[in-house]
Image (cartoon, rainbow, N blue to C red):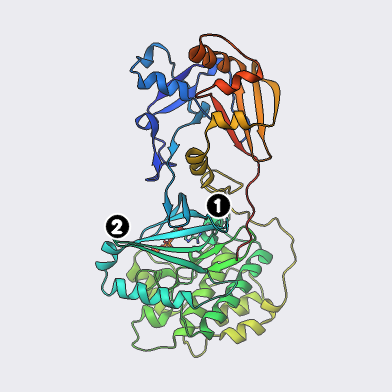
Amino acid sequence: MCNISKSDSDDQEFIDENQEIELTNRVFEIDSNEELQPLDGEQIWCNNMIDDLEDGVNINNFFHRVSSDQVIYQAKKRLKMIGKYVMGDLLGEGSYGKVKEMLDSDTLCRRAVKILKQRKLRRIPNGVQNVEREIKLLKSLKHKNVINLVDVLYNEEKQKMYLIMEFCVGSLQGMLESTPTKKFPLFQAHGYFTQLVDGLEYLHSKRVIHKDIKPGNLLLTLEGDLKISDLGVAEGQGSPAFQPPEIANGLDSFPGFKVDVWSSGVTLYNFVTGQYPFEGDSIYKLFENIGKGDFTIPDYIEDPLRNLLLGMLQKDPDDRFSLQQIRQHIWFTRRPPKNAAPVPIPPLRGDEWHRMTVLPYLFDHYYDAADAANEAQYFTERELNGIQIKQFFNENLVTLTVSEEMMKNEVEQNNGSAQTNQSSKRRWKKPISCITVRRLPGCKQS
Ligand SMILES: Nc1ncnc2c1ncn2[C@@H]1O[C@H](COP(=O)(O)OP(=O)(O)OP(=O)(O)O)[C@@H](O)[C@H]1O
């Protein structure tokens, strides 16, 4: 019999408003004495244990506290749909609101949704109008290196706007932060920088100035495509460390396109050195330093890259390189050799495979574990840490795993007799189960 223990875990990181927490947020852990380990990548939830607790049994009589690395499953995920989109987990949070993963139930494409609260927007002067205007603009843009706004939904009652975008696995900022050196090898920096220039050139051709180019606004798809994001709905005038001297000095008028060239120069500097050309203890000091335009480039950055950085970070916008000059620059045109391991995309909330977070919600809503066993076409038996388990295979998507011993208990409870052969699985009301996603639906980003 598998003992579980109650723990007042404060690890609520994975729980968001979509998740209905069973057992008032308590986490259940397998007793370490039983040595029942989760199978790789599998999740277990013990429904009959939950019933015991709901019946008001004093759990302390039965359960022992064990270390948290034994935690197997903690929360029920309640399905939430916004139109045809199935909501997944939180991806991040910006100043306007949350960004969550979504699945388009028509196309099975992974999406990200930025949830904007109109109440919040109204507090910003012209906030609502600006967003509306920007949405119109974003809808008219289509380029491989610019985040695509796929759909916009409104909920009048909740006063929310949902901006549905292409799904990305993370930002270049997150990748840089995940490395000890905080920088990319030159060939990787080159790959991202050339995509950034491609995207910027497209935006400028549409007479759009981004105003907030920085690694945090450059997202990556699973395929490694760079997407310029946060167009226009970004709050304020951009991030201070990436602002050009004409803004730091408060000039009244200046060529807007050169603002993007400057911040792309700071971004490239950051990619290849892990540092910023201008720093300051306060924003005033930072702007003072930017305003003077004096900076140094570490000696290990050699020409032609040094020359490119100097050209992009010219204090006077008229002297600053144009995008055409950048494109023709020798560093741009020649790909550096791949002489180091690339910086990988860091795990998303602990998952290095960046698996779809929508699936557990779908399983919880549509998939009854008992039905899975009933519908199973194949099963296999094996031993796991001394406990006999059965795995039922349903097509190639799902494996339902049930321990023989748990099965006995369940059947005894339900029928008063212990039946452990395969036919007994039809009688289970709530088997203790593992559901493993073996294959994810593929999706080509459109
Ligand atoms: N299309 C997307 N796919 C995956 N993650 C995304 C997507 N868009 C944004 N994110 C993530 O969501 C988080 C919040 O993004 P958002 O654009 O709202 O804010 P921000 O750029 O961090 O800040 P601000 O809006 O204040 O400038 C970021 O961590 C970002 O990486």
The answer to whether one can see residue 149 in this image is yes
In the image, taking residue 353 as reference, residue 99 lies left or right, namely left
- Find residue 102 and report its horizontal and vertical position in percent: 49, 54
In the rendered view, would you say 48 is above or below 358?
above
In the image, taking residue 277 as reference, residue 309 lies left or right, namely right
Helix, strand or loop at label 1? It is loop
Closer to the camera, 58 or 398?
Answer: 398
Residue at the image point whose x is 55% and y is 28% from the top = 370
Mark 1 belongs to which amino acid? Ser
The answer to whether one can see residue 42 in this image is no
Mark 2 belongs to which amino acid? Lys
Helix, strand or loop at label 2? It is loop
Crowding at dot 1, Cα within 10 Å, few <14 / some 14-19 / many 20+, comes out as: some
Say which mark, if any, is on residue 178. 1
Residue at the image point whose x is 53% and y is 54% from the top = 105
Closer to the chain start, of discs 1 and 2, is 2
Which quadrant of the render holds ligand 1? bottom left
Q: CA distance from mark 1 to mark 2?
A: 37 Å
Say which mark, if any, is on residue 158. 2
Closer to the camera, 176 or 344?
Answer: 344
Crowding at dot 2, Cα within 10 Å, few <14 / some 14-19 / many 20+, comes out as: few
- Find residue 413 and report its horizontal and vertical position in percent: 48, 13
Residue at the image point whose x is 52% and y is 40% from the top = 363
